[in-house]
Structure formats: C-alpha cells, structure tokens
Image (cartoon, helix red, strand yellow):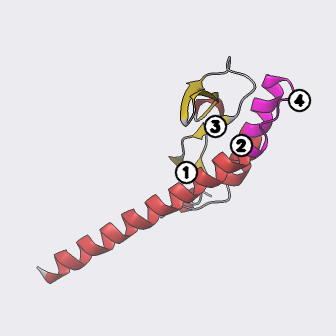
Amino acid sequence: MILGIVALSLDMGFLALTRNQMQAAADGAALAAAMELTSSSDPATVRANAINAASDVASKFHNGDRSGVALLGSRDIQFGQQVTIAPGQYQNNWGNQYTPYNIVKVKINRGLNKDAN
C-alpha cells in the first residue's frame, strides 16, 4: 500500500515537472517569435523569422524524460492581429491574412526520448 502511494506521488511529481518545463518552453518560444514581429518586412519573411526563432528557443528546453520539445513550424505557431474594438476591449484575429502581426500563439509537443539522441 505504501509503495503504491509513493509510486503515485512520484508520478504526480513527474507530471507536474513535465508540465512546468513544457510551459516554460512554450512561453520562451512565444516570446522569441513575438520579438520577430515587425511591420517593416514582408509577412512571409516575418513568419519565417518568427518560426525559426521560436524553434531555436524551444529546442533548448527539456521536458521530463525527453531531450527536447517539438515545434512543428507553421502547424504549431499561429500569427494574428489584436485590434481594439472599444476602450479595454480587444479582438484577436488569427490567420496569416491579418497583418501586420502583433500576436503569436505557440503549441509545444513532447520531443524525442533521451535514448533516441
């Protein structure tokens, strides 16, 4: 009984650790992508630069028993534009057609096993 409780608490701790590491990776990748959002470049160039920056930052994070997180380019990064519709009220428009971009959303996936590297 005690062994089961200890095993469950270790599993729960591992899940919490992995979740926190993945959240840190998503936050870092989103910040890196957001820093590349400029209105002075072609939207395709802005997207490419942001995806590269986010992927580079995300690759430096570990999560649980994995050596890194996976960020699958345009599938896991969305660009959009936030507009003010009234004082204190904003609308988020997601999609490549809403330029200049001023918001970014990043989805992180678990990466490779440590043994795979």
Q: From what the image shows, is residue 27 above or below residue 4? A: above
Question: Which of the two residues, 80 or 58, is positioned nearer the viewer here?
Answer: 80
Asked if the residue at tag 2 contacts the one at tag 4, i.e. Cβ–Cβ closer than 8 Å, the answer is: no
As drawn, is 77 to the left or to the right of 11? right
Q: Amino acid at mark 2?
A: Ala
Question: Which of the two residues, 53 or 5, is positioned nearer the viewer here?
Answer: 53
Check disc 3 and report the residue beneath it: 104
Predominant SS of the magenta segment? helix
Using a 10 Å C-alpha cutoff, classify the residue at mark 3 as few (fewer than 14 neighbours), some (14 to 19) or many (20 or more).
many
Q: Position of residue 79 (x, y in %)?
A: 65, 30
Q: Position of residue 117 (x, y in %)?
A: 62, 58
Q: Which residues are magenta?
A: 33-50
Report the quarter where the N terminus lies.
bottom left
Q: From what the image shows, is residue 74 above or below residue 28? A: above
Residue 49 falls within the magenta-colored stretch: yes
- The residue drawn where x is 55% and y is 27% is 91
As drawn, is 5 to the left or to the right of 54? left
Q: Upstream in the sequence, badge 3 or badge 1?
A: 3
Q: Residue furthest right?
A: 40
Check disc 4 and report the residue beneath it: 40
Task: State the separation of the CA atoms marked 2 and 3.
Answer: 6 Å
Secondary structure under the numbered disc 3 in the rendered image? strand
Q: Upstream in the sequence, badge 1 or badge 4?
A: 4
Q: Amino acid at mark 1?
A: Gly
As drawn, is 92 to the left or to the right of 99? left
Check disc 2 and report the residue beneath it: 34
As drawn, the label of residue 111 is 1
Q: Upstream in the sequence, badge 4 or badge 2?
A: 2
Using a 10 Å C-alpha cutoff, classify the residue at mark 4 as few (fewer than 14 neighbours), some (14 to 19) or many (20 or more).
few
Q: Upstream in the sequence, badge 2 or badge 1?
A: 2
